[in-house]
Image (cartoon, rainbow, N blue to C red):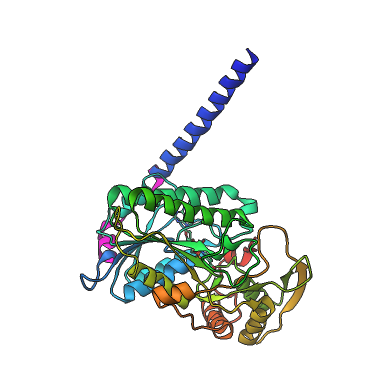
């Protein structure tokens, strides 16, 4: 009897959470902003029939904006999709949207995890490619809001795969993975040949899952899929949650910065900082070389490291910020918290060099100098005059 009651309770609980999830999906759908078809069709326009027409998810994001602008400037048709979530200040995403609109790129406001929303966008133009960059990014935020990673990175990924396989299996998909999949690996430089079975964060686990799911969609439906493992991307219009961005803000304000140390030996963390232009080039070459989907036609799923091959201590990045701003940083060294970061990253990019002609060319000093120039232009000569209250209050995670 007690057992029966427990089963009934479990059933009712499951049913109520399923129906609340369903009603959430329904309400999200009701709230979908209508797509402006005139702007969308013009955005998809290309200069020549041999150019691509690309649906870019996460277009109001850092990598999405830059890649969409370069695609459009090269004559390709582009339609963006983004949900403009508030993981970091939304005004920056709106400013990127403004820059995109000025260049003729329209961004449809859609949440990938809203069932059918991506499929609707995929039906708007005769797309030749999908560049799937939208995701819940950031390693530490997964400790605060793990569900957002499941929604955007897992449910969102499946929505993209399902829409492509139902609507047009010939469309190749290039998607963002991450260097974080190398997790606790110690052999460096990191190579695509290495096993990646020890993620250090939920974020990394979702990105590794994307690569595994991609394999399944290739195996069953013959989708053409390329995963790009980006290594710490930085540059103008970058992400406020990343260290180079928040350090610049703090240095300009005369506030201290927290520089993480390896808790095991007090050593410095290092990252293979990769400038945005190099990443954009890698994304576009991946689209161009992806080849058609189709059962028995599509190449096996591809994975590329896109890094700079120059692991750089965080202090060196801070030195570059000091040089570019002309201000001294107040450095507070603290042990790295146990929230999923790794000690160092270093990319082997031989595979991307051979297959994509990828050749990173911007060093940290030059890249940070370009970032700081943008920062001062965007936020004001002292770094805050044009910042919104939301941006001034943002502390990151
Ligand atoms: N920037 C880096 O250093 C880096 C490194 C490794 C991997 N990546 C990956 O590259 C991609 C782009 O990163 P980024 O730095 O431009 O991040 P970003 O946060 O600036 O851009 C991601 C965009 O996706 C949108 N988005 C998130 N969830 C969505 C959803 N459910 N539906 C629709 N839109 C959604 C966000 O609003 C955001 O504008 C991400 O997949 C990220 O995980 C980035």
Q: Is residue 36 magenta?
A: yes
Give the residue drawn at x 62%, y 61%: 183
Quarter in which the N terminus is drawn? top right
Image coordinates for residue 267, horizontal then vertical, percent: 75, 73
Magenta span dominant secondary structure: helix
58 to the left or right of 204: left
Say if residue 267 shows up in the picture: yes
Q: Which region is colored magenta?
A: 30-43
Above or below for 309 versus 182: below
> Quarter of the image holding residue 390?
bottom right
Q: Is residue 240 left or right of residue 39?
A: right
Percent x, y for residue 37?
27, 57
Q: Position of residue 355 (x, y in %)?
A: 40, 73
Q: Residue furthest right?
A: 265
- Foreground of the two, 387 or 334: 334
Q: Which quarter of the picture shows residue 55?
A: bottom left
Residue drawn at x 33%, y 53% is: 222
Please state, as top left, top right, bottom left or bottom right, where the C terminus lies in the image: bottom right
Q: Residue at x 59, y 74 (%)?
A: 272
Q: Is residue 148 above or below residue 228?
A: above
Question: Going by the image, does 100 lie left or right of 296?
Answer: right
Front residue of this view, candidates 66 and 206: 206
Task: Spot the residue most to the top.
Answer: 1
């Amino acid at each position: 009897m007690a057992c029966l009651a427990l089963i009934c309770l479990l059933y009712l609980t499951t049913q109520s959470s399923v129906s609340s999830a369903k009603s959430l999906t329904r309400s999200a759908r009701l709230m979908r902003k209508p797509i402006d078809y005139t702007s969308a069709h013009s955005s998809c326009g290309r200069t020549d029939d041999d150019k691509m027409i690309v649906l870019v998810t996460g277009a109001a994001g850092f990598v999405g904006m830059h890649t969409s602008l370069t695609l459009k400037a090269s004559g390709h048709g582009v339609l963006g999709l983004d949900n403009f979530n508030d993981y970091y200040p939304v005004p920056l995403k709106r400013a990127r949207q403004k820059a995109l609109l000025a260049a003729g790129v329209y961004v449809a406001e859609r949440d990938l995890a809203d069932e059918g929303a991506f499929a609707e966008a995929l039906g708007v133009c005769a797309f030749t490619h999908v560049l799937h960059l939208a995701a819940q990014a950031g390693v530490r935020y997964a400790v605060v809001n793990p569900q957002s990673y499941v929604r955007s990175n897992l449910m969102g990924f499946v929505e993209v795969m399902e829409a492509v396989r139902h609507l047009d299996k010939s469309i190749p998909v290039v998607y963002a993975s991450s260097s974080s999949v190398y997790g606790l690996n110690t052999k460096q430089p990191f190579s695509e040949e290495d096993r990646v079975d020890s993620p250090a964060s939920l974020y990394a686990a979702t990105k590794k899952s994307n690569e595994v799911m991609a394999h399944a969609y290739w195996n069953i439906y013959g989708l053409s899929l390329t995963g790009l493992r980006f290594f710490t991307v930085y540059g103008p219009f970058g992400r406020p949650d990343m260290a180079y961005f928040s350090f610049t803000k703090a240095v300009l304000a005369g506030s201290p910065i927290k520089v993480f140390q390896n808790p095991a030996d007090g050593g410095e963390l290092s990252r293979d900082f990769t400038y945005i232009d190099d990443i954009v080039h890698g994304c576009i070459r991946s689209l161009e070389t992806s080849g058609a989907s189709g059962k028995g036609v599509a190449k096996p799923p591809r994975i590329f490291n896109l890094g700079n091959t120059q692991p750089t201590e965080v202090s060196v990045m801070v030195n570059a910020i000091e040089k570019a701003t002309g201000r001294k940083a107040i450095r507070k060294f603290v042990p790295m918290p146990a929230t999923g970061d790794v000690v160092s990253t270093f990319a082997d990019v031989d595979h991307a060099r051979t297959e994509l002609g990828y050749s990173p060319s911007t060093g940290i000093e030059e890249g940070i100098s370009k970032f700081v120039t943008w920062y001062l232009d965007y936020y004001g000569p002292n770094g805050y005059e044009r910042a919104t209250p939301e941006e001034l209050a943002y502390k990151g995670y």
